[in-house]
Image (tube, coloured by chain):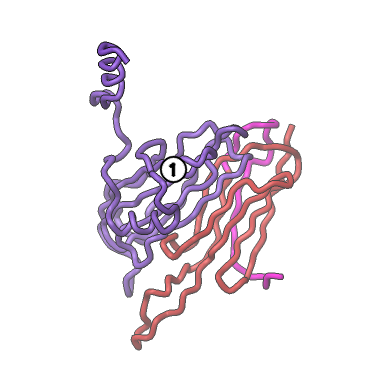
Chain colours: A purple, B red
Amino acid sequence: MTGRRALLVGAAALPLPVLVRRPARAAPPPARIAAEVAAVFGARPVRDGRVVVDLPVIAESGNAVPMTILVDSPMTPADFCRVVHVFNERNPQPHVARFLFGPRMPRAEVSTRIRLAAAQTIYAVAEMSDGALWAGQADVTLGFAACMDNG
Amino acid sequence: MAEPARWTVRVSVPPVARRGETIEVRALVRHDMETGFRHDHLGAIVPRDIITFFSCRHAGEEVFRVELGPSIAANPFFSFPARAMETGEFVFSWTDGDGRAREARAPIKVT
């Protein structure tokens, strides 16, 4: 590789300036979530991106917080997203749900409502048809928590 | 064979769609989703009682499936896109951790 070509490749690898809005911070997940992801997927690498976790920034109550998961996938027979696992940081049990998307789905998307025992990070990992793992996350703050007694 | 349950369910698909059209499917089941982490007024754990499985099928194929944990809110609700394939129905099923099950159907006319 010539010096100039190496420079070009290096430039391409640089992160884009802030023109692209990130759906969530691309930080490593909290330790408890990382352990649960490893329990489900083993030591396979998980890359940030292609998964949007849409939660309110502040939820009034933790009893039923609307959540939408959207995976960037063409959902064709050759290239699709088969499964998404959702993890939480601070509920009593770290695994929220496993979603399976069949070939009849035009988009890999689902909306539901979740419980939150505390303000925390929600983390979603999507497994693509080529076996690659992609992840997205969102932080949510609470007025009142759920899952606790009288909650 | 699963034992039938009497949970109230509400499902929604458009009554008419064009073949291949993307439609929005919604399904709700009335259920407390008791987490198993709460105590009653005597201090005893309230046993876990949750829906653990939801599935939606159309035209002989599974469209969407969920395996639920206790962090899914009471009265589990799912909304998701699907392709209308043929005149017939969408078949929804829910199962709880004790094997009780409920099924619901929504007709669709595909033109």
Query: Is residue A14 inside the magenta stretch?
Result: no
**Residue A108 in view:** no
Residue under the point 56% across and 45% down: A101
Q: Position of residue A5 (x, y in %)?
A: 30, 13
The N terminus of chain A sits in image quarter: top left
The answer for which chain carries disc 1 is A
Label count reads 1
Q: Compare residues B15 and B18 and report the one nearer the observer.
A: B18
**Residue B94 in view:** yes
| Amino acid type at mark 1 | Leu
The C terminus of chain A sits in image quarter: bottom left
Q: Position of residue A128 (x, y in %)?
A: 50, 40
Against A108, residue B11 (above or below) is below
The magenta segment: B1-24
Q: Which quadrant holds residue B42?
A: bottom left
Q: Compare residues B69 and A35 and report the one nearer the observer.
A: A35
Q: Compare residues A61 and B70 and report the one nearer the observer.
A: B70
Q: Which quadrant holds residue B100?
A: bottom right
Residue under the point 50% across and 42% down: A131
| Secondary structure of residue under mark 1 | strand
Q: Which residue is mark 1?
A: A133
Q: Position of residue B61 (x, y in %)?
A: 69, 46
Against A135, residue B91 (above or below) is below
Residue under the point 41% across and 41% down: A134
Is disc 1 surrounded by few (<14), some (14 to 19) or many (20+) residues within 10 Å? many
Q: Compare residues A13 and A61 and report the one nearer the observer.
A: A13
Against B13, residue B67 (above or below) is below
Query: Is residue B23 inside the magenta stretch?
Result: yes
Q: Position of residue A47 (x, y in %)?
A: 37, 40
